[in-house]
Amino acid sequence: MDNVRHIPHQADHDGPDQHEAERYVLGGCIHQPKQIPAIRGILTRTDFALPAHELIWDVLGELYDQGEPVTPMSLRIELEKRQALRRAGGVVYVARLGDYGGDPEYYAREVRRRAELRAEAELGRLIVQQATSPDAEPGQAVTFIDDYLKRQKERAAGRSGDPADALLAELLDASALDNMPALEPLVGDLLHLDSLARIIGPSGHMKSFVTIDLAGHVGTGMKWHGHYVRQGTVVYLVAEGARGIRKRVRAWEKHYGVRMDNVLFLPRPVQAMGPEWDTLIEAMRRLAPEMIVIDTQARVSVGVEENSNTEVGVVIERMEDLRRATGACVLVIHHTGHVGEHGRGASSAKGALQSELHVSKKGDNAKNIIVTVKVGKQKDDEEGADLQFGLKVITLDGEAKPDGRPVTSVVLESLDHRPAELVKGTPEWLVSVLDKAQVPLKWGSPRVIKWCAEYGISMRKEKVEEAVRIRKRRDSFDEVRDARNDLPPNLPRDLESELPHDQGGSPGENTQTHRSNLPPNPGGAPGDVPPRPPSPRPASKAGGGTEGDPGTRDDERPICTICALPMNPDWANRGYDTHLGCDPATGSHPDRPTHPTTDHERHSA
């Protein structure tokens, strides 16, 4: 016993570290097996924070009950028989438990105290989530309190040392079933919190693209192509294809015009059968994400015979340990076999899944590829209809290949769900108009109000301010997505043609500087960009009226002599008889047959 490490009971107010205390309990029971019945009266296996310690505690108890020696060597042999030595931390970790000694009862009480604090913290988290959910009703959180008291009763029965009492305490009558929390949706009816799910499909069939799209929507809280999304942190283990993840994320951000917030990436695998998996579990328990993505199952289970139900079952149990510790949706990406639509390898894994989605594609290029997401399994819900997506090619700004070609990636576009048409006069509608006109994101409400007055858009001040707030929330992103194709059909027709197109600069500047692949107008040449709007002038009756003024109706406005569409009265008062865009060669100004070509001429004009 001289090599046993001792520490004093009075360490600090909070007691020893949780995991250290658990090691002292296990090491103390190895040195003093007769203390095991007393420890059973203090704590249960679920009081251990680490799954590896739960496993070791179970084996120590069985060795004691069978009258076998309780030593580090006998513990190691029994773990090897169960093929669970790596789950317990490995040979070195198990052997080092013999270095821990002292009073196991003291540390058992510390482990129990920490476990009760964790249970209370979890109860508080559930109550807050319930009370702040969109459909919250007073009194619903009582079910969580009832469930908490029930679990405390079970723990007390388990600590009595009688296994039969502990088992009887776990039995539920029909009314007690109502206290069991229901599955909480994470993404529609497809994925749920506190569940193990899997996305399967052949290699190269867009599984990772679908998963990144899901992760981005959960992180930002946006609906996933029309499906409900619960916003939360996502952790993505990029165990396969780490170098390509940045390009896919940047394409997603450019497409949606927002940062992929709350999504964290670990660009390497963590082996499920190795000791680092317990470190991952503890890190995720502290972070408390809503979704954990494992890409792919094969890369985190190297050395496991994937056709063996026994070995794959252990891997799945390790993933279940991760789920139990975090309450997250653990989403695993896995390949299908060469034949059929089933996950490659042992079939036992599917039985543990709450949900399984099958991803496949047809087509040979981005223009005609169709990605289908099929719900292969929903344990407790009806399997919904298949979902289909097309691909949109996104060019990454400021990036080029060595030969000068642009760097591109793709994002999913739903073929089933179409966004609702924007209603004219709403803040969202004004956002689309401002985006289309490329009004700078930094403009505040006063400048936008003047701009709206100049172009005959009459909206209440509070709606304009809300539109400005919506745009400023995207201000951290360098470039807003092109909203030109999403505009509602009821835009003011004169706004389409009266936005100024000539903002100065040398001839051919747009074609020489390839700043964007967006055309200036429908049918325009690539490389041109829509012009920035001019600085607003003070609102006037001639310029469309001030705030609250109904403005000039279309049927009272001057008519363009070329396109026969209404013109802005202020434009006509300045001497124009056509829209500027209708005659780009002359500008249609009666006093100046050509465009000004110098700064002096522009200012004098």
Image (tube, rainbow, N blue to C red):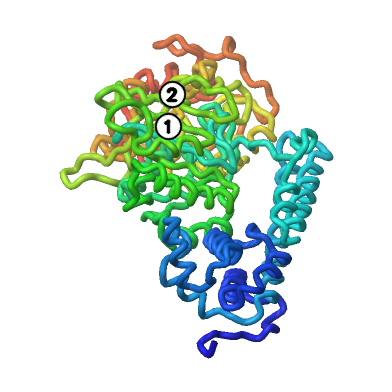
Task: Locate residue 195: give its quadrant.
Answer: top right
How packed mark 1 is, by other alpha carbons closer than 10 Å (few <14, some 14-19, many 20 or more), is some
Could you tell me which residue is drawn at 38 percent across and 45 percent down? 297
Could you tell me which residue is drawn at 37 percent across and 50 percent down? 301
Query: Between 74 and 254, which is closer to the camera in this rendering?
Result: 74
Residue corresponding to mark 1? 482
Query: Between 415 and 140, which is closer to the camera in this rendering?
Result: 140
Q: Amino acid at mark 2?
A: Asn
Q: Secondary structure at mark 1?
A: loop
- Assign the N terminus to one quadrant of the image: bottom right
Q: Are marks 2 and 1 in contact (CB under 8 Å)?
A: yes
Residue corresponding to mark 2? 485
Number of the label disc, if any, that sits on residue 497: none
Q: Amino acid at mark 1?
A: Asp
The alpha-carbon separation of the residues under discs 2 and 1 comes to 7 Å
Query: Between 38 and 12, which is closer to the camera in this rendering?
Result: 38
Q: Is residue 520 visible?
A: no
Q: Is residue 59 above or below residue 343?
A: below
